[in-house]
Image: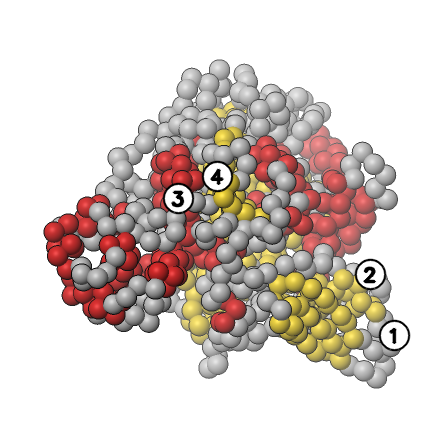
Amino acid sequence: MVNCCGLITANKDPVPLKSIEVELEVRDHVATVVSTLNYENKEDKPLEAVFVFPLPGDAAVCHFSAQIGQTQIVAEVKEKQKAREEYDDALSSGQQAFLLEESEQSPDIFSLSVGSLPPGESASIRLDYVTELAVQADDGLRFCLPAVLNPRYQPLGSGGSGGSGGVQVTSVPASLVPYSLSFSARVSSPRPISKVESSCSLDSLQYLNSDQTQATIKLAAGHKFDRDVELLIYYKDAHQPTAVVEAGQASAEPGSLMGDPVVMVSLYPEFPQSVMSSVASCGEFVFLLDRSGSMGCSINNSKQQETRISSARDTLLLLLKSLPMGCYFNIYSFGSSYEHIFPKSVEYSQQTMEEALKKVGEMGANLGGTEILSPLQHIYSQSCIPSQPRQLFVFTDGEVGNTKQVLDLVKKNSGSHRCFSFGIGEGSSSALINGLAKEGGGHAQFITGTDRMQPKVMQSLRFALQPAVVDISVTWDLPKGVSVTVLSPPITALFQGQRSLIYAQLTGQSPKAAEGCVTVKYSLAGHPSQNQLRFSLKPAEDTGSTVHRLGARTLIRSLEMEERERRGQPDGGLKEKVVQLSVQSGVSSSFTAFIAVNKADGEAIQGPLVRRNIPISRMCIVKGKSRNLRMGAAIFKNDCYMGGGGAARDKHAGDCCIIGSPIAMACSLQLDDEFEMADDVPPVMPKQPPRDPLLQLVSLQQASGCWLLDPALSAALGKTSEEVDKSKPAPVNSDVWATVLALIWLHGFKKDAKEEWELLAMKAASWLRSQNAPCLTECVEAGNALLGCSMQKDVLGL
């Protein structure tokens, strides 16, 4: 039975977290984020607050400090176990202490322990991190401040079962969340800023100069922290490659990463339209769909009737209709277990397409938790089909407790496939979604707010059907006396819409030459291409340390992954290298933690610390069984505090993941990393809306690309069978007539959704051309007259 500590709202007991202030600085495509968390203990006893929160998966935490009254304490990076021991020792001595550490399981979860906050005392915690901004398919740079972190589902057998003595973190409506958020951003770039968009209300963009390369923007007043704060930043001439050099720190040792200059090369190629307009007619397409309980939630706040699973079913319909004849495909779905439609991938035909669509139509959010590792292992165990490049599409709204293990598996198999990933709904893990695409050489997309899933997924299918870039090489031309150490793993894939960053350390000096050069060569569809970039070897001294820290983070991630791959074998001191690099650069890692201790005299803690739950915003409710929680809650097990003066701490909250951010919870010192969600409980399905006319028409298309002339098609076109039959030119084949009508209707009435149907329309036009049908011009004219349109043959692809 769960030991619930009760719901505490703003109208009843006070909570430690008062307000959050976030300042964002974006320089070109990297961001520095400064967050300040203000706490106050209004209890009459000391508190330990444990604050579990998400960050972008590739973020590098680089500063952590605390202000208590007039005293400021700046944290140091230390090896994790040493930091934990120092934290516990400080609390035992009555000293205030702060511990910040990354989760063992996922790089985008951190826990902050605010130790021994005395009665009536306030504390301000400052946390700085730097991160790369992901490029969306429309060239926008995406920054996300997560408000909600979906529960991490622990696979069975890993300690995820509910147990006695747990703490329920209670969820409340967003209107009752008792802390405020202020958010401001400053954007600067060598290129003009064309616009900044957001799913949240913003004040107007304020340009700071005449060439519009600098601007500021703020979150509108009255924002409730009930959703992710997402910014999409658009620059003019976004595809120009760049090379930025950052000077080394004067205080750091020359020859060290932080003491030497670091160059960041950005590649975001735009390929010729002639190549991009061609699509492959082969490939093995494997679709992996999340069917956990939370997929039954609505996809956004404005369309309560559309669920994540229903949107995913509609998306699979478009995908299956758009596949080329001659390819292979299969569909997997997963929760606590997994299913597949075919034992192995099958050739795409009318029969296999119909069989798959029938199974897709029956799919519900009823497979339990979110265990993605097993189906991935099964997919990779299947032999690849010769001359059919494997393309994996992963759809999930949730998160997993073993993100690093999942990404290691994808990377291990990166040579045999490309992986395209889709994060559905608020709070999907950036570490998981971006990591799947990065390690799998594909592209990541996030579907949030009022976004429609279908256009984003079809964009990625278009990427998958386009030729891949091969023979990628990077060469450096540096003057004598200067050497380069590349910090990034080799680039293995480049395609339209994907940006790649290369970080490199420049060691040594040249008395004369002031410039270096990097050349990137690659081949696309048999055409060689190259980018050559020159950069200064004498950068200004005040360029900050953002690039250094991102370079350090990149190298740390590579070494961590290598250490996990070699676990149980001699690793050549990889862990020690990570710790050394993390301490030297001040950047977080899975083997280190930030520790800050107020060394002022203190008395030993008397009695147990008080436990407090902080309410968090509720995004979705799922009915639960007797021992399961509602969606928006997690259970911590086996919590206790050994009071008196001796603190005991076996496991730490850094391994816990809770829905909601920020979440502050004043609780016991010992928190177990095991928890359970009610993800295995299917929700009550909302009433489904009427079928979208576009999807109704698409559902009638044959695998070959044509439509059949039947009453269902007439109804989808908004006509009677008699009207359609009567208008058909006499010499025209009925299937040709039906297909022409469908194409005219798509171009005439659904132009705004062209991204969704463009590929299947290309397939239909190709089928029509193959028929060598007579009187096609007359047929198009008759179709226009019937449907009230004025489409030309060339517009239809004929």
- Amino acid type, callout 4: Ile
Query: Tag 2 or tag 3, which sits nearer the N-term?
Result: 2
Query: Tag 1 or tag 4, which sits nearer the N-term?
Result: 4
Q: Crowdedness of circle 4 by 10 Å Cα count: few (<14), some, many (20+)?
A: many
Query: Tag 2 or tag 4, which sits nearer the N-term?
Result: 2
**Left or right: 706 in relation to 490:** left
> Residue at the spot x=61%, y=22% of the render?
157
How many numbered discs, if any? 4
- Label 3: element kind: helix
> Residue at the spot x=78%, y=75% of the render?
477
Mark number displayed over residue 350: 3
**Left or right: 493 in relation to 173:** right
Q: Which residue is mark 2?
A: 256
Query: Tag 2 or tag 1, which sits nearer the N-term?
Result: 2
Find the distance from the CA under tag 4 to the CA under tag 1: 55 Å
Whether residue 674 is visible to the viewer of this picture, yes or no, is yes
* 1 vs 3, front mark: 3
